[in-house]
Image (cartoon, rainbow, N blue to C red):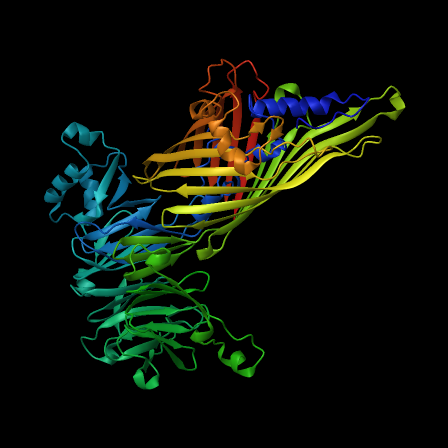
Amino acid sequence: MANTPFPTGARCLKTWTSLLLLGASLSWGAASSAVITLAMPIGARQMAMGESGTALAEDAFAVWWNPAGLAVGPVADEWTVSMPHPKDGQIRGLSSKEKRGFLGSAEVWAGADGGLWHFKDNTWRDWWSVSLEEGQTLRGALKRFVGGEEGIDTLLVQLRAFNGISSAAEEEELVDVRLPWRLVIRDSVTAVHYEAGSDRVWVGTNRGLWRFDGAGWKKYATELGDRRVNRILSVGATVWIATDDGLFRFRRSVMTRKGTVFGANQKFTALAWSESRRELWTAVEGAGVARLQPAPEEGGGKDKWALFGESDGLLSTRVKALVVDSRDHLWALHDEGLSRFTQLRWEQTRFERTVLNDVAVDSRGNLWIASNSGVWKYKAVYGDGTDKKSEKDNSGSAATGKWTHYHRGNGLASADVKAVEPRGDDVWLVTAAGVERFHQARNQVGIFYENLLPRFNIDDLYHLGAVGTFPLGDWGTIGGFVNFISFGEATIESDNANLSQTFNSTELVVGLSYGTRLTRRQSLGVAFQFLYSDLTSGVAGQEDATTASYAVTVGWLMRDLFVPRLNVGVVLANMGPDVYYVDKSQSDPIPLTWRFGIAYTPLQLADHRISVTADYSRESIHIDGNEPDPFYVAMWKSWIDPETGSDVPDAFKEGQVGFGVEYVYSNTLALRLGYLHDYPFSDVSTGRRELDMGVGLMISDLWQLDVAMIKELNANDARDGQARISMIFKF
């Protein structure tokens, strides 16, 4: 802003004081640059951590800090290996519990050759935790858990060892006890199902059926014996169990065998329910797909069965899975393809050189098909109802639907997918790599506010920001931001008081950002910024001090460098032409800035997470004589010919460093602390030094509130007490 003229023959100290103080507080000792708003960060979370957000690109404010962060989760759709296969066996099947309420979290149950696993609060466990009630002993809790006294002495020894109990005194002091699933489930799990209505988990093994009610297990040995359980499905208060020897219904504590019309020792392999038609679909090995219309609970009547085979249009009588979609179409999955029943006819879709393993439908109506060559997502395209045919059968050909194929090249760690379980914004898969998770990102919108230089009590000196991110699937994520500063209203006083004039000084930057993946761990981002600065305009007798231009920012992000959860980022911000306000011969560069960042999460447990961050940034302006060099020269020349020295080490001393630490409890409450220092490596004793503090509140996956505050540590306390607040909404 060195070339900006003061209004001739007038006094307007307020605006110029604001500009000079703000510029000095943000870039102490640096070369002169214009449009200070380009260098003003947004996002209270990162600002509470010493303004270190280059590698902490995890929310919508990444559009400013590092646009490469738009290519990774949770801002973008993302694939991760949630858990590798256990050493004692392979994961075979999944079931999930939908998130309930604002503070709820989704849960996943995984059945394995070696037992059972439970996912909650971003952590997999092979145990269940209970709190001992007053007077309850460890033996009593174990008895309730296993459902009886049989073998309890041996199990008690194992339980003490699992909880690290070596004495009676330690056992008496125990408050919470971890009960491993393997104390009960010792056989290979062949089916697992979460019953939403009663909050119970049903587990089928190769030797029977078990049920867990949150406190203890019950085995249905008398009702089912040692039958192998293939599928479990709950409908209201009714539970259907498909076994190698019959189909069973469990209702009101009574187990009833169904499907005897197909003969004795019949193998049932799959189950699906149509809620609107009140029909059960089941696969009968070697016979085809059967439809059951159960008899009414009251009023008598008989079950009604119908069987569909290859002569009816079924692709094969060997059916591995069934699902009913949002249009009441039944999908039957075979090794070689799919059969779909539209309630009027069967249609076939074959897959070449591919073996299908599982099928499911998500809450958005998409079909997910697991195979040995990846997973397919199918979005059906139905008739619009304008013709009689589409009005009658409400169908759409699979050929006209939208197919998306996910494989190792675009997300999966392994293309061999055995099972699929959609739930909410996530799709869980069992692959050769373990349990993989596909997170479908939500749109995010954020707002930001901070009061500037509070010690000077300039009410209309403030900073506003707004951001938004919108995922584009495999294409990455697009976003945008608005950055606005009000320098306040000023009055030009002339010798004649009646001729005094007032004006407002503002700056506005509007950016459009985009991020995309380069590899599984690397991403690239770019932001196009359009700027407008109005220092004085509309003042009679004076030339307008305004300028408009553009700038480009490029960012790179590498995740999991050397070790998991270690990220590094590099950003070159504000590449653009010089700007001028009144006299083109007196132009100023915009604040071209290098930023280098690192972020590491050394602790990530179920209820506790600690992250540390660090940023180094340097404004790279180079003045050759009286003329600033263009950005493509200044970006490198300012390092070898710095303002305060003669080589790269001297240039490095001109930078700014920021450090931060964040502690998050139960993914709900965050505490943050940061330190920022301008010119920390120079020999001078002055410079900007400040302590940043902040808190955050996360309400599920819908809303996030962050607040930050500055405590100045040197004599220049213009920013002391400066408050920042931001909110993010996800939808």
| Residue found at the very far bottom of the displayed protein | 311
Q: Position of residue 241 (x, y in %)?
A: 27, 66
Does residue 43 appear in the picture of this structure? no
Q: In this view, does 135 lie to the left or right of 524?
A: left
Give the total number of marks visible in the rendering: 0
| Residue sitting at x 49%, y 55% | 472
Q: Position of residue 696 (x, y in %)?
A: 48, 34
Q: Which residue is at the front of the view, 629 or 504?
A: 629
Q: Which residue is at the front of the view, 135 or 678?
A: 678
Does residue 685 appear in the picture of this structure? yes
Q: In this view, does 377 lie to the left or right of 623?
A: left
**For residue 474, above or below residue 155:** below
Q: Is residue 494 left or right of residue 441?
A: right
Q: Where is residue 312 in the image (x, y as percent from the top left)?
A: 34, 85
**For residue 277, above or below residue 13:** below
The quadrant in which the N terminus is found is top right
Question: Within the image, what quadrant is residue 494 found in?
Answer: top right
Q: Which residue is at the front of the view, 567 or 172?
A: 567
Q: Position of residue 62 (x, y in %)?
A: 49, 41
Q: Which residue is at the front of the view, 560 or 604?
A: 560
**For residue 442, above or below residue 37:** below
